[in-house]
Image: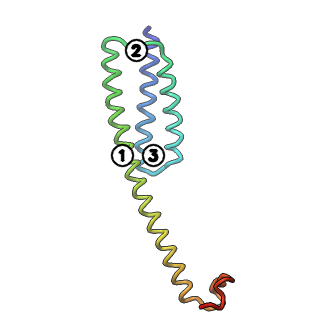
Amino acid sequence: MAERLSRRMVLLAAYEDFTRRESVSLRDENFELLAKLQDKKAKVIAQLRALPEQPDGAEAADFNARVAKLLEQEEANSKLLQDKMAVNRQELRKLSQNAVSANKLRRAYAAPSDRPPLPKNLKGRA
C-alpha cells in the first residue's frame, strides 16, 4: 500500500511541476509549450485515476491540501489565459480595422494603374 501512496505522491508532484511550468509559459505567452504541458498533465491525471484506492490518514490530508492549492493555481492560470485571449481578440479587431482603412486609403490615393480593376458588372455605370 505504501508503494501506491508513494506513486500517488510522485504523480501529484509531477502535476504540480507541470502546473508551475504552465503558469510560466502563460506569462511568457509560450503557447507551444503550454500545449505540451497540457498533454503531459492529462497523462498524469489518467495515471492518478488508474490508482486503485485513495490515500489514508496524514497522507490523505497532505494530498487533499496540495490538490486544493493546485485547484487555486489552475483557476489563476485559466483567468490569465482568458485575459490573454481577450487582449488577442482586441488586437485582431484593431488589425482588421487597420487593414480596411489601409485598403480604403490605397484605393483613394493610388494611381489609376495601381488601382484594382472594377468588377465588370459595375464598369461604366458610375
- Which residue occupies the extreme right position in the image? 120
Q: Is residue 52 above or below residue 67?
A: above
Depth check: 37 or 92 in front?
92
Q: Give the amino acid type for the residue marked by disc 1 in the picture.
A: Lys
Circle 2 Cα neighbour tier, 10 Å, few/some/many (<14 / 14–19 / ≥20):
few
Alpha carbons under labels 1 and 2: distance apart: 30 Å
Q: Which residue is mark 2?
A: 54
Tell me: 119 left or right of 82. right
Observer-side mark, 2 or 3, equals 2
Residue 74 position, x and y percent, is 38, 37
- Which residue occupies the extreme top position in the image? 1
Observer-side mark, 3 or 1, equals 1
Query: Which numbered disc flags the more N-terminal residue, 2 or 3?
Result: 3
Residue 65 position, x and y percent, is 31, 25
Alpha carbons under labels 3 and 1: distance apart: 14 Å
Q: Give the amino acid type for the residue marked by disc 3 in the picture.
A: Ser
Q: Residue at x 50, y 38 (%)?
A: 37
Q: Which residue is mark 1?
A: 79
Q: Give the amino acid type for the residue marked by disc 2 in the picture.
A: Gln
